[in-house]
Image (tube, rainbow, N blue to C red):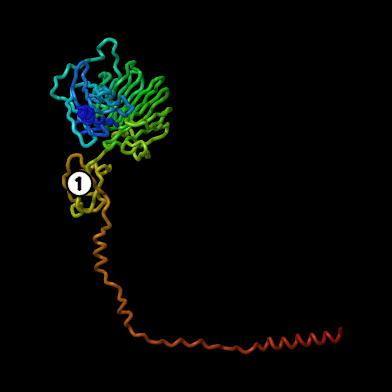
Amino acid sequence: MLVLLALAPVSAAARTPAAAEVRTVRVVPGEAGPVLEVVSSLPLTPALQLLEGPLRLVIDLPASILSTTRKRIPFRNEQIKDIRINQYRSGPAVTRIVVDLASPVRYTWDALGNRLNIRLRADLAAPSKPASVPAFTSGVQPVAVPFSESSSGTLVEAGDRVASGSSITAGAETAVLRLARGGEVRVCPGTTLSVTTSSNGQDLMLGMSTGAMETRYHLEESSDSVLTPDFRIVLPGPGEFNFAVSADSHGSTCVSSLPGSTSSVVVAELLGTGTYEIKPDQQVLFHQGNLQTVESPVAPCGCPARQVPVSRASAEAGPVIPEDQAGTNLQIASSGDVSARPSGSPASSGDDASETKPVPEAQAGAIKVEVDAPLVFSGTERAKARARTPPAPILEAAALPLSGKPAPPLPAVLVLPPDSRLEHKGILVRLKGFLGSMFR
């Protein structure tokens, strides 16, 4: 009997399962909707129930202990308003995740090892409630007014009111939201943006999964946030916040400061403690949702530049008249002497006596060209003349025999005798000089 009493506590302890450690809880995009991903130290089997008043999805994780310090996941879309996490019980240990819903959802779950996936999608079969019009309700002010720069490209019309919790989808062109407090938010083409305000109506929270957006406004003593699947981008006032934010399907997030911005923004991890400050005149790309991989973006982060329509003028080419039908004389129809005589009439007495061949009738509005000067140059005739000209007889000239020719005789040289008069005059001059020297 004593042996049985000693073994009973050991058997009860052996049947007690070890508590799993809930390490991370995050939201990742899925094919049909968001996926709530739970990573733990041991495999978990959840217990899910959908409750009303308010509408929420409660997820209990038996035999689990919450190890993360985060109690809230700031994720929001058309169906989900908020996600809360807490340690519901300690003995037995139960971790509870509450998903606050804006509309009914359908859910499924699957597990792979220590990773639990809870997949959510919109319940299209649920009866929809009539849409409320907060702009007509006393005491409720719209958050923003959609303003379209053109007649197309956005799914909302100018003049509608966007209340808290609404979503705006831009079509082929950028949709502009004029904020009631001042400034504007630009929703780039193909982007769906959710708009939520705080209870006091001062702080603004914008959320998007993929796409791009731009903020262009001034903040005083308030703080706005932009949520992407991986980051929370905080805009702490006061200051001028002109920033562009974009995110793709791979998680790469680009944040860029636009001209006129005077304050910095802080990028914080949704499922971590890392932060990064982006100062004015700075643009940063976080590759694949990792705050540690900081790169310089190649392309701009914001909306594409608006295309300016270009006017193009064109004129149909006139008819081409073959050379054999143009005749010997062509005349310009706009010249003064041509208007005086009809087309095909004989030329004046000073011109060639031959008549101009009639030009075929052209279509209405076509340009008629007539020239009154004869055509004196033809490339075809010149080419034919060159073809008929024989080549120079270079080879024949080289084969001719060569013969020597004697040099012409030199002309005869005639030597004249000296003049006798000059010789007699020379003797007298010498005699005169001799006699003169004797009588000196």
Q: Position of residue 309 (x, y in %)?
A: 28, 34
Residue drawn where x is 26% and y is 42% of the image: 334
> Taking 417 as reference, is 93 above or below it?
above
Element marked by disc 1:
loop
Visible residue check, residue 304: yes
Visible residue check, residue 167: no
Location of the C terminus by quadrant is bottom right
Using a 10 Å C-alpha cutoff, classify the residue at mark 1 as few (fewer than 14 neighbours), some (14 to 19) or many (20 or more): some
* Numbered label tally: 1
Depth order, front residue of 63/309: 63
Of all residues, the one furthest to the top in this rendering is: 138
Depth order, front residue of 170/23: 23
> Taking 286 as reference, is 94 above or below it?
above
Depth order, front residue of 266/157: 266
Residue ID for mark 1:
319
Q: Position of residue 412 (x, y in %)?
A: 52, 88
Q: Position of residue 250 (x, y in %)?
A: 27, 38
